[in-house]
Image (cartoon, rainbow, N blue to C red):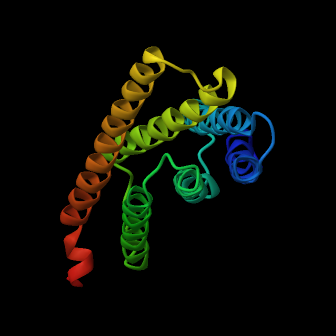
Amino acid sequence: MNLPNRLTVARLLLTLCFVVVLSLEFPYHHTVAFAIFVLATLTDYFDGEIARRYNLVTNFGILMDPLIDKIMVAAAFITLIPRGVMPSWVAIVVIVREFLITGLRLLAAEKGQVLPAENLGKHKTSWQIATILYFLLFLSSQEIFGRMEGATAQVWLTALYYGGLVMIAVTVTLTLFSGFRYLWKHWALVGGT
């Protein structure tokens, strides 16, 4: 197994650790979860970069890299719901879109076609990860700085609230738009023609 594939497998293991840490209650568990997710995100960047630069692209990597990305993002959105920072409908939109596109790719594979990821889909994933990091950083900052009081705290919390709304709005818009665009572009596969 080459280095990019090891990094892909490491990302899956880091995702499992992230879910366990975020689900447990111990001092600074949000901060530890944030650090683990950052590390998982870095493995995502480096596995692709190394594979392309040194021509280490494998069938395992082509299949598993995007699949583990989807697992990582879905796991993060789902585990943020009980923390009270992520609306459940956002996680549902993200996960349904990923299942639909994966189903479309399986349909294409049955017909001997490969549907590559598009740039818009990569931007969508980047925004999803940025949104997850935003809310993890928010939870981590609450642990580190504690509950602030007074007018400063209210301004800070209001800014974080509206910042979160913007992150969610952009993420959901890109998720839906990229999904509909991808389905529209490959509709012939669905129609059976």
- Image-quadrant location for residue 2: top right
Q: Position of residue 123 (x, y in %)?
A: 35, 39
Q: Furthest-top residue in view?
A: 152
Total numbered labels placed on residues in the image: 0
Location of residue 179 with respect to 153 vertically, above or below: below
Q: Residue at x 43, y 16 (%)?
A: 151
Q: Residue at x 57, y 30 (%)?
A: 137
Q: Is residue 19 left or right of residue 74?
A: right
- Image-quadrant location for residue 127: top left
Q: Is residue 25 left or right of residue 159?
A: right
Of 184 and 90, nearer the camera is 90
- Image-quadrant location for residue 97: bottom left
Q: Position of residue 113 (x, y in %)?
A: 37, 68
Q: Position of residue 44 (x, y in %)?
A: 59, 39
Q: Furthest-front residue in view?
A: 150
Look at the image and tell me in which quarter the C terminus lies.
Answer: bottom left
Q: Is residue 77 left or right of residue 158?
A: right
Q: Furthest-right residue in view?
A: 26
Q: Position of residue 17 (x, y in %)?
A: 76, 49
Q: Is residue 95 left or right of residue 13?
A: left
Of 74 and 10, nearer the camera is 74
Q: Residue at x 58, y 49 (%)?
A: 83
